[in-house]
Image (spheres, rainbow, N blue to C red):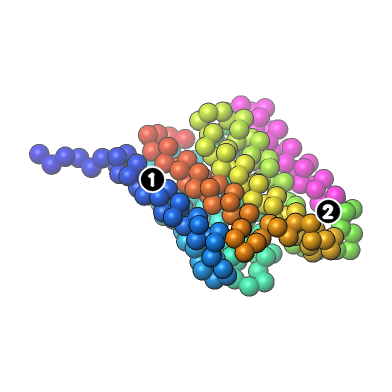
Amino acid sequence: MKEAFDYRKWVKIFALAFVALEVALFPIIQLTPGDVSAYASYSAIILVAVFALITVKGACAGHLIRLGILFTLVADYFLVLADDSELEGVIAFCTVQLCYFAYLLVKEKRRSVKITNAVSRALLSALLVVVAFLVLGDDADPLAVVSVLYYGNLVANVVFAFLLGREERIFAIGLALFSMCDLCIGLEVLFDSYLDSSAFDFVYGSHLNLPWVFYQPSQTLIGLHLGTKINVDKDGV
């Protein structure tokens, strides 16, 4: 009798291959110049999307993360491969964080925490927009405003992902690394473009792409998190 296809076993094999390929891409992203690094970077995100599709037979809530990964591909196309498309990329990343916000709401069973999640991020978003205009004044362009909205929602997602406990710990760590990546980018843009300072020029060097030191592992962990959900019945949460 033919042995039944062992889906869990194959997901584990693909997970090992996925991690190995991400590790192989890491030095290429960090140590190669220009276009080579850019295409290696985008390839790393394509691998995350492929693994997300491989793990599709999991809890239904995971599809919200997969949707977020799809928009991550869109965002990184604008930010990594396209020219002068920062605003489009950050808008796409805002959508990513909305997908993850929806996932956290679905996974959270405590009504009080759900309400706190929604209300606190709305207040935080409003506060950050006000602060952006106060700090930047006439320099508060659409990119700056969208960026603070995006980052505020990312930080909120980090907090509420950790509040879900051990079950969502890999996802929470991935989001935390995600926030570290964008903190590096935000500080470099703030000092270079708005404050006319070179204090954070070290973020991008000939042998260092500091944001991607955090970003590539963050996306890998978010993908691997989906691999931990294959033991959940497909019709479950």
Q: Quadrant of the N terminus?
A: top left
Q: Secondary structure at mark 1?
A: helix
- The x, y position of residue 176, in whole percent, is 62, 41
User: To which residue does mark 1 refer?
Assistant: 15
Quarter of the image holding residue 4?
Answer: top left
- The x, y position of residue 7, in whole percent, is 29, 42
Q: Specify which label sits upstream in the sequence, 2 or 1.
A: 1
Disc 1 packing (10 Å; few <14; some 14–19; many ≥20): some
- The x, y position of residue 114, in whole percent, is 65, 33
Front-lying residue, 147 or 12: 12
Question: Is residue 14 magenta-colored?
Answer: no
Residue beneath the point at 63% across and 73% down: 83
Q: Amino acid at mark 1?
A: Ala
Residue beneath the point at 45% across and 51% down: 23
Q: Is residue 44 visible?
A: no
Front-lying residue, 143 or 182: 182
* Magenta residues, dominant SS class: helix
Q: Amino acid at mark 2?
A: Ala
Query: What segment carries the magenta color?
Result: 110-131
Tag nearer the camera, 2 or 1: 1
Question: Is residue 123 magenta-colored?
Answer: yes
- The x, y position of residue 69, in whole percent, is 52, 53
Q: Which mark is residue 184?
A: none
Give how far apart the Cα atoms at labels 2 and 1 are.
Answer: 41 Å
Residue beneath the point at 37% across and 45% down: 16
User: To which residue does mark 2 refer?
Assistant: 132
